[in-house]
Amino acid sequence: MTTTAEYPGELECDVTLPDRRQLHIRPLRPDEEGPVRELDARLSMRTRYLRFLSPMPALPDSLLRLLVTVDYRCRLSLIAEVEASGRREVIALGSFGAIDSGTAEVGLVVSDAWQRQGIGTILARAILRAAEDRGFARFVAHLLWGEHGDAASAQTASATSSPAGARQVRPKSRSSGECLRKRGGRRRRSVARLPE
């Protein structure tokens, strides 16, 4: 059985979105189901299908357990939260899980209301950086080709397709275009727009 490493507080950061709203990114704690259930409740069937490549009315308990079983070394999930009505609302989840000692499978989902605002890109960079910092050099992501946002994926990744239309995407190394600054013990990011 794998033991859980110390909570990686260095992965917590605040990001100022182009519309000046603040996004807080933090690691999911082991067995912290609430935020994942909260996010899942706001996903449309289409978004859930695009993330998990399977039609499902709600996230099954077995998949939920897989997402929240983190050890911060071989399995890690990051959530993105915004302040709404005096409380934090979870709007996105990014995760990686080791396939072998050098390869990790990555996944990402952004709540429908928050899509197309660069949050997926911010979270993808954060989860890839966390995986790289833990020794992973190769990444695999599965997605359906032809959906919005794939042009950006194609620019930063090599991809192969299956006969069913799913794509296996292998992101290239970190891209630049993001400034990191330490402020108040946590990183803050200013996000540069990716070329269209």
Image (spheres, rainbow, N blue to C red):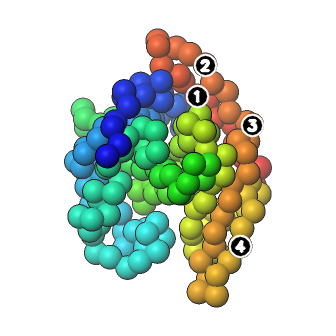
Q: Residue at x 24, y 32 (%)?
A: 86
Secondary structure found at label 3:
loop
Is disc 2 in contact with disc 3, using a CB cutoff of under 8 Å?
no
Q: What's the CA distance linking mark 4 and mark 3?
A: 24 Å
Q: What's the CA distance linking mark 1 and mark 2?
A: 6 Å
**Quadrant of the image containing the C terminus:** bottom right
Coordinates of residue 84 in the picture (x, y in percent): 30, 39
Please name which of the two marks, 4 or 3, marks the residue nearer to the observer: 4
When the figure is inspected, residue 43 is found, relative to residue 34, above or below; the finding is below
According to the picture, the residue beneath numbered tag 1 turns out to be 189
Dividing the picture into quadrants, the one containing residue 125 is: top right
Q: Depth check: 151 or 52 in front?
A: 52
When the figure is inspected, residue 87 is found, relative to residue 64, above or below; the finding is above
Is disc 1 in contact with disc 2, using a CB cutoff of under 8 Å?
yes
According to the picture, the residue beneath numbered tag 4 turns out to be 160
According to the picture, the residue beneath numbered tag 3 turns out to be 176
Please name which of the two marks, 4 or 1, marks the residue nearer to the observer: 4
Is disc 3 in contact with disc 1, using a CB cutoff of under 8 Å?
no
Q: What's the CA distance linking mark 4 and mark 1?
A: 32 Å
Q: Amino acid at mark 2?
A: Arg
Q: Amino acid at mark 3?
A: Ser
Q: What's the CA distance linking mark 3 and mark 1?
A: 12 Å
Disc with the residue nearer the chain's start (4 vs 1): 4
Q: Depth check: 189 or 106 in front?
A: 106
Disc with the residue nearer the chain's start (3 vs 1): 3
Q: Amino acid at mark 4?
A: Thr
Q: Residue at x 35, y 54 (%)?
A: 67
**Mark 4, residues whose alpha carbon is within 10 Å: few (<14), some, or many (≥20)?**
few
